[in-house]
Amino acid sequence: MSMVDLRSDTVTRPTPAMRRAMADAPVGDDVYGEDPTIRALEDETASLLGHEAALFVPSGTMANQIGLALLAHSGTEVLVDKDSHIMNFEGGAAAALWGITLRAVAGPGGRITREQVCAHVKGVDEHIAPLTAVAIENTHNRHAGAVWTFEELAACFGAARDNNLNVHMDGARLWNAAAALSVPPSAFSAQADTVSVCFSKGLGAPVGSAVASSRARIARGRFLRKRLGGGMRQGGIIAAGALYALRHHRERLVEDHARAARLAACLRELPDLDVLPVESNIVIVDLTRRGLDAPRESDRLREVGVLAHDVSPRRIRFVTHLEIGDGDLDRAMNAARSVWGA
Ligand SMILES: *Cc1c(COP(=O)(O)O)cnc(C)c1O
């Protein structure tokens, strides 16, 4: 039985056209700054994000960590949401690599508020590690791909500015946020001091992420990337997949969002399932009221041909992407009805 794989938008494989673009890409040694494909990708990414410069890196984790290192230093604190990727899924990198302490707060819907920023600003006191930056996530993975409103962003960024704090935006799925509100990505990211984006999620490239900021910060970022072992020589081969995705796969993200909305509507009709609000390509269903176990339920879904991800003991996540068409969605909805129907 072929499986409908809704575990993550990272499972997508390069399309034939993307593979051709990769095979044909002009390349050079990027550590010498001579890979034309990487340079083109960095330039287009920077301009879409409203920043002076961008740096191609192997993963979103490296993009976030370079962003943090550019904005904060050893012995200081960065404020994050408790459910964020930086807090939970980067192997303790901020502490291990840079000596940065993360201060986690429960932002409503994963969005850090003005009050939360202000409450964590500290005066000069010999007991206290100074807060130097705020890192936010847009869209928010663990909050079902929630998109920040511009009011929420302005409040959080404004509080950071008022208190001389830097802001990093984890925009692994910023392309989805932009598609959801029909705005350019820069509408969210231009105000951040550093922003990370992934090409390997909804955009469907096999590998790659970027971090964008000022020219001066990105020059320092190049040094940090090399230090981390992320200098990639003829990396244009993979950057070509990312560049193709950036040019050809952003507009179609709204299709993923529409399918996620259909899946959510189907799940809401099943008894006693709680579906988090769906704003982009992620659907999270909470099984608490049914008293069901998420790992066990994802096994049952697998038996009927659907792969999903148990993100917590009571929650299962479905992510729509490039390889999920209407037929796959119908199969997934029928599987959900057969497993959780009355
Ligand atoms: C996937 C993801 C990352 C990091 O991506 P990797 O490329 O897997 O390191 C960072 N932030 C968020 C919100 C993500 O979903």
Image (tube, rainbow, N blue to C red):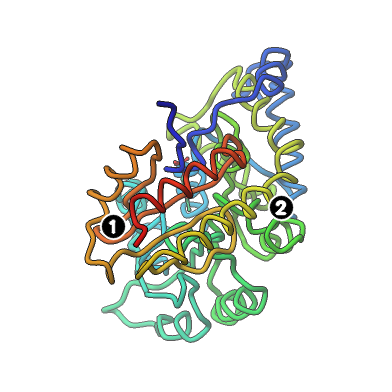
Residue hosting label 1? 312
Q: Look at the image and tell me in which quarter the N terminus lies.
A: top left
Which residue is found at the position 22% from the left and 66% from the top?
291
Kindly indicate the quadrant of the structure image that contains residue 246.
Answer: top right
- Side (left or right) of 41 relative to 274: right
Sequence-earlier tag: 1 or 2: 2
Q: Residues within 10 Å of mark 2 (few under 14, many from 20)?
A: many
Specify the amino acid type for callout 2: Leu
* Element class at badge 1: strand
Who is closer to the viewer here, 17 or 272? 272
Q: Residues within 10 Å of mark 1 (few under 14, many from 20)?
A: few
Residue hosting label 2? 49
Q: Look at the image and tell me in which quarter the C terminus lies.
A: bottom left
Q: Nearer the viewer, mark 1 or mark 2?
A: 1
Who is closer to the viewer here, 282 or 137? 282
Which residue is found at the position 67% from the left and 16% from the top?
28
